[in-house]
Image (cartoon, helix red, strand yellow):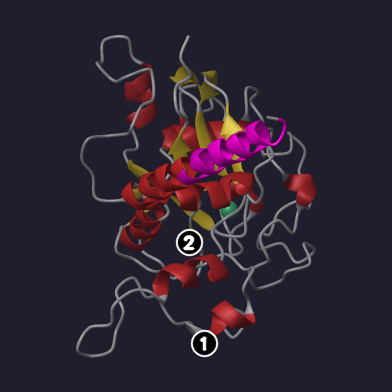
Amino acid sequence: MNTFYPNRNRNRNNYFDVIVRHLLILVLSVCPCIAVFAQDAENMILVAAGTFTMGSDNRAADEKPMHKVYLGAYYISKYEVTNAEYYEFWKQQIADAQGIRKHTPENFAHLPQIGEWPERAEQFPDHPVVGVSWHDANAYAAWKGMRLPTEAEWEKAARGYTDRVWPWGNAIEPYANTAASDDGYKNGLAPVGSFPKGKSYYGAMDMAGNVWEWTADWYSDVYYWHSSQAFTKRPKRDPTGPAVGSWRVIRGGSWIDKISRCSTTFRFYLYPNLKTSFVGFRLAKTAEKTSK
Ligand SMILES: [Ca+2]
């Protein structure tokens, strides 16, 4: 009797382990993005649901006016996507008849501090990936089971609930990789996270400088004005930008920009198929709703 029950319990535990293991394999095979996201969870920041102030009354015309926007909970990358991370995506692309893989970053042989692809993935693994189009960024995000942040999500992650001019506060500080010569990375990219004092309210790194970051939204110079008007039907919750456009929004400034273009509200734009040495991206993901 004394030995029977322990054995039976052990068998029961073994059955339980087998069932759990098979269930896990089944779930992961149905949705591999769950596994990928789990690996990245530590580098994703949860931004709690709530209202924040979008835009500025004191700066460029397309940032006006300040208006309240509500966003549901979401995750945003702590860091810009790196060369090493993008390489994992790129190497499993299937090459065409000319040997060219889809979503290949642009080469910058004339900029040895950035270099050619894929050599720079090994040479500068922790640098943000550049030379990627908006379409490349979206393809990578989808591969990771995520997406690009909306312009509203990007701005909230950069400034928090306060009207910070820069992610770290309102005073100009050398806490970002910009065109300034005293930031330690003159004329080139910095490894992501090189400016810990420059972290945002939520702890996101390099939201000012290093590389501009693609967002999901189309650009419109009157988008903020339109969003603030009571008569429009623009959603005041989780807005996704204009319905149509020619350019995609990029945010945060870069290593070639003055710090004035690296503020939390400065808006800029680029044709989505362009691949430049100063635009990269970070990822976002909608947080699952918790049941009440
Ligand atoms: Ca940046």
Return the residue at label 2: 279
- Could you tell me residue 132's position as x and y percent? 41, 67
The rendered magenta stretch, by its main secondary structure, is classed as: helix
Dot 1 amino acid type: His
Helix, strand or loop status at disc 1 = loop
Give the class, few, some or many, for how many residues have Cα within 10 Å of label 2's Cα (few <14, many ≥20): many
Mark before the other along the chain sequence, 2 or 1:
1
Query: Is residue 243 visible to the viewer in this orientation of the structure?
Result: yes
Q: Which residues are magenta?
A: 2-18
- Could you tell me residue 53's position as x and y percent? 54, 21
- In the image, taking residue 66 as reference, residue 164 lies left or right, namely right
- In the image, taking residue 118 as reference, residue 137 lies left or right, namely left
Image vertical order of residue 102 relative to residue 159, above or below: below
* Residue 110 marker: 1
Report the front residue among 76 and 194.
76
* Residue 9 marker: none
Q: Residue at x 79, y 67 (%)?
A: 184
Q: Residue furthest front?
A: 1
